[in-house]
Every structure is written in C-alpha cells, then in structure tokens.
Amino acid sequence: MSSSFRPTTESKVAANKFVPRRGISFALQVAILAGLVTWAIVQLSSRAIEQEQRRDYVAKQQASLQGPLSSLANDISRPLDTGQNLRVQKTISTRFADKNVMLLNANSEVWQFGATRNSALPPLPIDEFEIRASVEGARIQLGTLVLRSKVPTLHWTFIVAELSLTLGSVVAVLAFLYVRFAMRGLNGIHGLLEQMRKGNYCERTAQVGCSQVRQTIEHFHAALGEMTTLTEHARKIYLETAIALSKTIEAKDRYTSGHSQRVAVYATEMGKRLGFESERMETLRIGALLHDIGKVAVPDDVLLKAGALTDEEFATMKRHPLAGDRILAALPGMRDMADIARSHHERWDGRGYPMGVAGDSIPLEGRIVAIADAYDALVTKRSYKSALPVEKALNIIEKDAGSHFDPYLAKMFVAMKRNGQGYKACKAKSFDQSPLSNETMGRS
C-alpha cells in the first residue's frame, strides 16, 4: 500500500538508457528520410556535374572541329560538282580518319559513294554529338557534312552509385543517433504527464536530451513544484479537517475520547516492529487516526447508547466502515487511508464486515488497525462496559488469533505487550488465563 503524501524530492530514477522505449519509430523515419535525401542529392549532383562536363567537352570539340570541317566542306564542293565521288570519299577519310564524318545530299540523305541510292541519316545516339558544315556549289547548296563523335565516359561516374549509398547510410545512422539523443527526455516527460494525470506531482525525471527538451523538462519541474506546494497545502487542510471531524465524533462520548490517538499509537508500534518505511508508517498513522470517521453517519442514539445494541442498531453501526471509505476516498491523496477505514472491522476468517473478505485479501494496514482498535476497546471503559485488565485483553487477542485477527500480527502484538513494550503493556506479573468473551468488540 502506498501513500500520496510524499515529500518533493528529485527522483533518483534517471533516464540512463541511451534508447528509451518511446520514439524509436519516429527516429527511424527521420533516419530513412535523411538517408534517402542524401542519396538523391548525391545522385542529382553527380548527374548535373556530368551534364555540365559533357556540355563543356562538346563546346570545346565544336570550337576545335568546326573550322576543319568547314574547310573540308569547301575543298570537296568542286569534286562534287564534277561527280568525282571516290575523290570526295578519300578526302573525308584522310582529313578525319578517327571521326565519323558523313556527307548528306540536299535531301538530308547520306551519300552512298559507289551505290545506286542514298540512305536516311540514322538518329543521333545519346552518348554522341554532331557538327555540321554546308557544302556549297556554284549556284545551290549541294549538301551538308555531318561529323559525329562519342562523348568520352567520365571515370568518376562509376563510383557514384556506391558513394551515394554509403553517404546515405552514414547520414541515416547519424540522424537516428542524434534524434534518439535529442528525444531522450521525452520518455521522462510522458512519465511526468502520466503521474500528473494520477494526481501525483512529486515525481521528477532526469534532464536529458537536446537543449529544447531539457528546457521543457526544467519548466515541467518548476510547474510541478508549484503544483506540489499547492496540492500539499490543500491535502493538509483536508487532513486537518478530517481529523477535526474525527475528534468531534469522539467528543460526543467522553468514554471514547482519545480512542483514535491511542489506536494510532498501537498501530505505529506494530508498524515499527514490521519495519515499515517512513512513508508507509505515515499512511498507517493517519489511517488509524481516521479509522472511525465513518461514525459521523451513525445516529447519536445508536452511537451513544449505553446498553447493548439491537440487531437493527448493530446493522446501522456496521455501516460506518463504508461511510469512512467514502468520506476519505473523496479527499485528494487519501485513498490508502480510506482502505484502512473500510477494512478495520474485517476478520481473518472472512466473517467480518462490511465486505466479508478474508486472510491476505484484507489490507495489511487494516489488519494492524483491527488489532489496535480491538485492544483499545478492551482496555478502556465504555458506556456499555468496564475496562478489562491488560492481561485479559491480551488473552482475548491471543484466543481470537486465526479467527478474528491475523495470527502472525496477533502473536506479535501480544508478545510485544507481554514483554512490556509500548503503551499500556503488561507489567511483570502472572497472567489470568480465564476465558473471556469479546462480543462487545464490534462497537469499537
């Protein structure tokens, strides 16, 4: 059982994991996108550079070959006029032995020297360029010289594919690592929001991640600190109000004055023996102080009746644990105390009220308060009975261990009191072992 009454301290649970649980898919998406963008940039950049170098090469070739091609066109114009085809073919092959030079007629068809007809000019391949020069006759244009040559392949283009994949992969990994680092603190922010949703403003998280995330966490902590202060102040008011209401109930009957305070003393004695930490001990103490707050819903003629209760009146009295549960559960941070108020009249054998639960199903704090409540009811004077000696009260607790009370807790409590430990413990003398009844304990 935990308590919502916690001091405002920095949480020692730091977000040490380099890759938190949340945001991995987002980081992967960013990494993949960054890798694809890098790959595309490298590919497009290489193609742009290749095209620019291709244009530069073609421009240089045109500047260097246009003059010789035009000179050749002038030199072969006269042989064409006289029909010396073989001489024209020889001249072309001599001047441009390493180039593909074709002669087109006036219909833009390739002259087939020694053939009966001409053929159409084939399309220009994508990896070639061409230069043209007109062959002028005495009166009309006889044809056109066309020089075609391949653009050499750039050696660095062979590594573009591997380079783009490598750079894309490296950028993707770096992007993933950076995004994960930048988002480390988001997991803690989600945790803080979840705790805020539950009404807990005392949790803190480590300030990690990028600067923006760290600043966000810092602002969260500042806001939580203010909310914690306000919440604790409100809880203090609620608690003081509840305790005042509980004292008001006790003040109606002089016989029960101080009952809740004594029950709290007995309960905390047992809590210390069980090794409760301070937070749980405070929950037990407050729950014990307020365990009978539900009696505010019990009419005074039943609550203060001097004699034995009728069945109907006892049924009315048995409603106070649930009434206490409803009252305390409505107060912020009092859920654990409400469990104590509800369960302090449950029995180990399941024959208690209001829920009739048994054994370990009863909250541990409720089982502790049940023993403390019964013990104080036995050893103090009430309007309907006299106070019993400590020895006889312990006999009743011991006899009802395993039926009414948790056997381990009952044995521990009896041993503490018989050893002289705590408030209203036994003195060093023999014990009266005569059988006694406990039928009046239900009105505690």
Image (cartoon, rainbow, N blue to C red):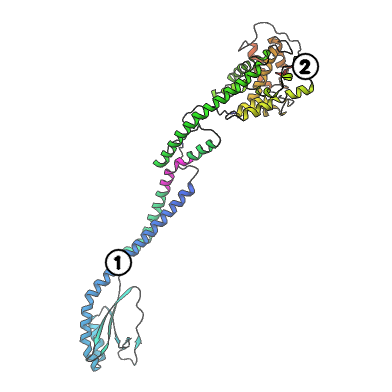
Which of label 1 and label 2 is nearer to you?
2
Asked if residue 12 shows in the view, the reply is no
Question: In the displayed structure, does residue 48 sit left or right of residue 2?
Answer: left
* Dot 1 amino acid type: Glu
Give the magenta range. 176-187
| Residue 63 is covered by the magenta coloring | no
Marks 1 and 2 sit apart, C-alpha to C-alpha, by 109 Å
| Above or below: residue 196 compared with residue 392 | below
Question: In the displayed structure, does residue 168 sit left or right of residue 86?
Answer: right
Secondary structure category for the residue under label 2: loop
Residue identifier under label 2: 308
| Above or below: residue 417 compared with residue 29 | above
Query: What secondary structure is the stretch in magenta mostly built from?
Result: helix
Q: Residue at x 74, y 12 (%)?
A: 385
User: Residue 188 at what x, y percent from top left?
Assistant: 48, 38
User: Residue 32 at what x, y percent from top left?
Assistant: 44, 54
Q: For the residue carrying disc 1, how many other residues have a C-alpha within 10 Å: few (<14), some (14-19), or many (20+)?
A: few
Quadrant in which the N terminus appears: top right
* Dot 2 amino acid type: Ala
Residue 52 marker: 1
Q: Residue at x 32, y 88 (%)?
A: 107
